[in-house]
Image: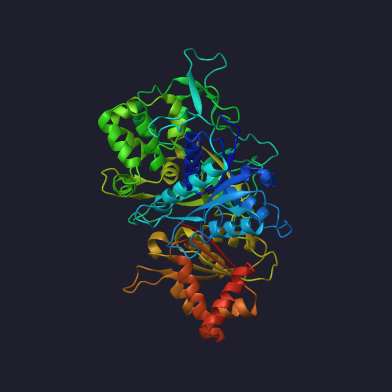
Amino acid sequence: MPAPQLLVLFGSQTGTAQDVSERLGREARRRRLGCRVRALDSYPVVNLIHEPLVIFVCATTGQGDPPDNMKNFWRFIFRKNLPSTALCQMDFAVLGLGDSSYAKFNFVAKKLHRRLLQLGGSALLPACLGDDQHELGPDAAVDPWLRALWGKVLGLCPPPPGLADIPPGVPLPSKFSLLFLHEVPSAGSEGQQVAHTGSREPPSESQPFLAPMISNQRVTGPSHFQDVRLIEFDISGSAISFTAGDVVLIRPSNSAAHVQQFCQALGLDPDQLFTLHPREPDVLPPARLPQPCSVRHLVSQYLDIASVPRRSFFELLACLSLHELEREKLLEFSSAQGQEELFEYCNRPRRTIVEVLCDFPHTAAAIPPDYLLDLIPAIRPRAFSIASSMLAHPSRLQILVAVVQFQTRLKEPRRGLCSSWLASLDPGQGPVRVPLWVRPGSLAFPEMPDVPVIMVGPGTGVAPFRAAIQERVAQDRTRNVLFFGCRRRDQDFYWEAEWQELEKRGCLTLVPAFSREQEQKVYVQHRLRERGPLVWELLDRQGAHFYLAGNAKSMPADVSEALVSIFQEEGGLCGSDAAAYLARLQRTRRFQTETWA
């Protein structure tokens, strides 16, 4: 390969931006261009001043926030002391991925594009704004933008003379080769997941702590539509510490049934051992995989076979298919014209990778094992708000988990990988260990002891506020107001007895909303309006901080609307002044949100 000429940097939360970035890398290789693809926070950002050509691919999460793996880059690139000529040698393009149903649609991409221009960069194209809400998904914007991009890139970096493009139907070399071992190494078989064994450094993604599960208790009533679990881990000796608002990341495993189904479809022996060898000098094997590794370990612990495949999966599968009819269908699914049909086949019913492979049996059986890591993404960790305080529960960590299960037109119910895996673990049947680590969350609670807090947490959104209330009560901070919403008092009123005891002690003002206990549905935003005088008094006169945790779709807008109404009715502000008051609370971090899709 030629020396790297193009750099692709991505910020990805769910994997879509990473997938698009890897697509860029493949398309560059087909055009005989050198290309590096890196996560933004794994790239030394100070080196940007030496990069002539960079494509940024970034998602927008929550309420206009950057993904976790670009937050350090985000803080650096917006430093006020960076000179306006810092990136004057750089040609760049920004590809954004967002959802137009959110108020801050593609906010990260738009803001990054403007900032790169401020630092002297030269834009090859206007920013691409991919939209999940489009009937064809982000590709409706991405496909034509990429065609224009390659025209610009090839003008700046023409390929070596005499080398033709690699045709789309020809598979590129795999990233790794898998060398199967015919004899078991004398040192024994594969290791287990890399475990943090009590060093002074806190656990991390590369070295999680295998935390013993202490309890796994259903906390919703037997007739409630959803199984919600309160799960407790023992973190003794882990060097883990956390405060209210932090989150724990958990890496799940695939079910034994799915592992068996996958191995049968591909004709793999789950107990076969192999070693992994990169084909390129600057590529390292995944740190999470032991050497040697068994097929079972690879499939159960690493390959995300229960995820819904992306278009790139079908593109590579078509290249690898030797069966004419199956190859024809796969090519259709991977084409720009076939995206509507692919959506109906795959995305709408949430069909998984293992199910797709079973639908294309001849192709699946002929997949070279070398391509497994190119074809199937790695299992991503899932983040959960920590629902306990170390001041109340030393050496323990608790989470509240809603088990995801729903029906589509497919016979088999759709299940969330991590929540279903956690729910299946029973510490009563024997020791259970779960790989986890902790990182700071987006909520930061006031350090001043006399500052009141108002918390709005419907459903499992109440989890971080339980941690905050436990922490504050342990510190004798009793000015806590909680608006909690659920369906029915007797079905999903999490920690009812705990809240009532704190109320008796004068440590909590609880305002519940039960949406299904009366003819007219009542939600937390209605209770917020009803308690408008209290909310206004605490915010305007006593400097309270306001927190919201819940679904990102409608909850932030509904609660913001309720607050603006309170500011008008109780504070006597006009509409524009009420909106400005809310914006000032957000700007000064007195109004904070933690939301999820």
**Quadrant of the snapshot with the C terminus:** bottom left
Q: Quadrant of residue 546?
A: bottom right
Number of numbered labels in the structure image: 0
Q: How is the image coloured?
A: rainbow
Of residue 76 and residue 52, the one placed in the foreground of this image is 52
Q: Quadrant of residue 43?
A: top right
Residue under the image location 30 percent in, 40 percent down = 332
Whether 198 is drawn above or below 17: the answer is above
Residue under the image location 51 percent in, 80 percent down = 566
Residue 112, position as x, y percentages in the image: 59, 56
Residue under the image location 63 percent in, 34 percent down = 197
Whether 117 is drawn above or below 309: the answer is below
Q: Is residue 453 left or right of residue 424?
A: right
**Quadrant of the snapshot with the N terminus:** top right
Whether 77 is drawn above or below 547: the answer is above
Q: Going by the picture, which residue comes out furthest to the front?
A: 161
Residue 568, position as x, y percentages in the image: 52, 83
Of residue 79 and residue 574, the one placed in the foreground of this image is 79
Could one spot residue 476 in this view of the protein? yes
Q: Is residue 193 left or right of residue 171?
A: right
Could one spot residue 512 in this view of the protein? no
Residue 341, position as x, y percentages in the image: 29, 46
